[in-house]
Amino acid sequence: MNCFNHPDVPAVGVCKTCQKGLCIVCAYDLGNGIACKNHRDEVEARNSITDVHRVAAVFAILGCIMMLSGSFMDFSTDEKEQILQLLGIVMAFLGAFFFWLGNKIRKTKSK
Ligand SMILES: [Zn+2]
Ligand SMILES: [Zn+2]
Protein backbone atom coordinates (compact mmCIF):
# COMPACT_ATOMS: atom_id res chain seq x y z
CA MET A 1 0.00 0.00 0.00
CA ASN A 2 1.18 3.52 -0.82
CA CYS A 3 0.55 6.90 0.81
CA PHE A 4 -2.83 8.52 0.06
CA ASN A 5 -1.19 11.91 -0.62
CA HIS A 6 1.98 10.58 -2.30
CA PRO A 7 0.97 7.62 -4.55
CA ASP A 8 4.60 6.68 -5.26
CA VAL A 9 5.71 6.61 -1.63
CA PRO A 10 5.12 3.44 0.43
CA ALA A 11 2.85 3.90 3.47
CA VAL A 12 4.19 3.29 6.98
CA GLY A 13 0.67 2.84 8.38
CA VAL A 14 -2.95 3.87 8.13
CA CYS A 15 -4.87 6.70 9.84
CA LYS A 16 -6.77 5.39 12.88
CA THR A 17 -9.87 7.32 11.85
CA CYS A 18 -10.14 7.20 8.03
CA GLN A 19 -7.90 4.16 7.29
CA LYS A 20 -5.97 6.05 4.56
CA GLY A 21 -2.40 4.96 3.88
CA LEU A 22 0.18 7.44 5.20
CA CYS A 23 3.90 7.82 4.47
CA ILE A 24 6.45 8.96 7.07
CA VAL A 25 5.85 12.63 6.11
CA CYS A 26 2.03 12.46 6.32
CA ALA A 27 1.72 10.27 9.43
CA TYR A 28 1.41 11.84 12.88
CA ASP A 29 2.33 9.66 15.81
CA LEU A 30 -0.30 9.89 18.55
CA GLY A 31 1.34 7.41 20.90
CA ASN A 32 -1.39 4.78 20.53
CA GLY A 33 -1.56 4.88 16.73
CA ILE A 34 -1.06 7.24 13.80
CA ALA A 35 -3.37 9.78 12.15
CA CYS A 36 -3.49 11.88 9.00
CA LYS A 37 -3.16 15.68 9.24
CA ASN A 38 -6.93 16.20 9.26
CA HIS A 39 -7.64 13.66 11.97
CA ARG A 40 -4.70 14.51 14.20
CA ASP A 41 -6.46 17.63 15.50
CA GLU A 42 -9.65 15.68 16.07
CA VAL A 43 -7.93 12.91 18.02
CA GLU A 44 -5.92 15.43 20.03
CA ALA A 45 -9.12 17.24 21.01
CA ARG A 46 -10.56 13.95 22.22
CA ASN A 47 -7.35 13.12 24.12
CA SER A 48 -7.42 16.47 25.93
CA ILE A 49 -10.64 15.40 27.66
CA THR A 50 -8.69 12.84 29.64
CA ASP A 51 -6.88 15.87 31.15
CA VAL A 52 -10.21 17.11 32.50
CA HIS A 53 -10.76 13.69 34.02
CA ARG A 54 -7.25 13.73 35.50
CA VAL A 55 -7.98 17.09 37.16
CA ALA A 56 -11.25 15.63 38.45
CA ALA A 57 -9.41 12.66 39.98
CA VAL A 58 -6.89 14.97 41.69
CA PHE A 59 -9.68 17.06 43.21
CA ALA A 60 -11.62 13.99 44.33
CA ILE A 61 -8.53 12.42 45.95
CA LEU A 62 -7.51 15.69 47.65
CA GLY A 63 -11.08 16.11 48.87
CA CYS A 64 -11.11 12.63 50.40
CA ILE A 65 -7.71 13.15 52.04
CA MET A 66 -8.85 16.47 53.53
CA MET A 67 -12.08 14.99 54.85
CA LEU A 68 -10.26 12.00 56.34
CA SER A 69 -7.41 14.02 57.84
CA GLY A 70 -10.02 16.35 59.33
CA SER A 71 -11.43 13.42 61.26
CA PHE A 72 -8.15 11.74 62.20
CA MET A 73 -5.77 14.60 62.92
CA ASP A 74 -5.75 16.03 66.38
CA PHE A 75 -6.24 19.75 65.89
CA SER A 76 -6.04 22.22 68.71
CA THR A 77 -9.43 23.66 67.82
CA ASP A 78 -12.59 22.14 66.41
CA GLU A 79 -12.88 25.13 64.12
CA LYS A 80 -9.81 24.16 62.06
CA GLU A 81 -11.12 20.63 61.76
CA GLN A 82 -14.46 21.87 60.45
CA ILE A 83 -12.82 24.18 57.90
CA LEU A 84 -10.66 21.33 56.61
CA GLN A 85 -13.64 19.01 56.31
CA LEU A 86 -15.63 21.71 54.54
CA LEU A 87 -12.75 22.27 52.10
CA GLY A 88 -12.61 18.52 51.54
CA ILE A 89 -16.31 18.42 50.67
CA VAL A 90 -15.89 21.38 48.28
CA MET A 91 -12.93 19.62 46.60
CA ALA A 92 -14.92 16.39 46.22
CA PHE A 93 -17.77 18.35 44.66
CA LEU A 94 -15.33 20.04 42.27
CA GLY A 95 -14.00 16.60 41.34
CA ALA A 96 -17.52 15.38 40.56
CA PHE A 97 -18.15 18.55 38.54
CA PHE A 98 -14.99 18.02 36.44
CA PHE A 99 -15.98 14.40 35.78
CA TRP A 100 -19.38 15.59 34.61
CA LEU A 101 -17.75 18.31 32.48
CA GLY A 102 -15.31 15.82 30.91
CA ASN A 103 -18.11 13.44 29.94
CA LYS A 104 -20.18 16.29 28.56
CA ILE A 105 -17.31 17.54 26.34
CA ARG A 106 -16.58 14.01 25.14
CA LYS A 107 -20.24 13.50 24.15
CA THR A 108 -20.28 16.74 22.11
CA LYS A 109 -16.94 16.02 20.41
CA SER A 110 -17.47 12.36 19.44
CA LYS A 111 -20.65 13.02 17.47
ZN1 LIG B 1 -7.59 10.44 8.78
ZN1 LIG C 1 2.57 11.06 2.15
Image (cartoon, rainbow, N blue to C red):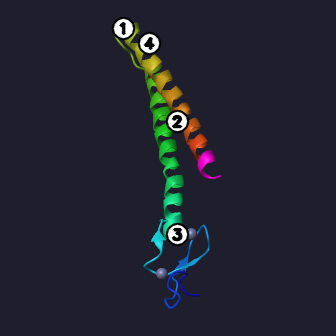
Which dot, 1 or 4, sits closer to the camera? 4
The residue that mark 2 highlights is 98
The residue that mark 4 highlights is 82
**Position of residue 15 measured from the top left corner of the image (x, y, whole percent):** 56, 72
- What is the spatial separation of the Cα atoms under label 4 and label 3, in whole angstroms? 51 Å
Q: Find residue 96 and report its image quarter.
A: top right
- What is the spatial separation of the Cα atoms under label 1 and label 2, in whole angstroms? 32 Å
- What is the spatial separation of the Cα atoms under label 1 and label 4, in whole angstroms? 9 Å
**Position of residue 55 measured from the top left corner of the image (x, y, whole percent):** 46, 40
Look at the image and give the residue range highlighted in magenta.
Answer: 107-111
Three-letter code for the amino acid on which mark 2 is drawn: Phe
Nearest to N terminus: mark 1 or mark 4: 1
Q: Is residue 29 left or right of residue 103?
A: left
- What is the spatial separation of the Cα atoms under label 3 and label 2, in whole angstroms? 28 Å
The residue that mark 1 highlights is 77
Secondary structure category for the residue under label 1: loop
Three-letter code for the amino acid on which mark 4 is drawn: Gln
Which dot, 3 or 2, sits closer to the camera? 3
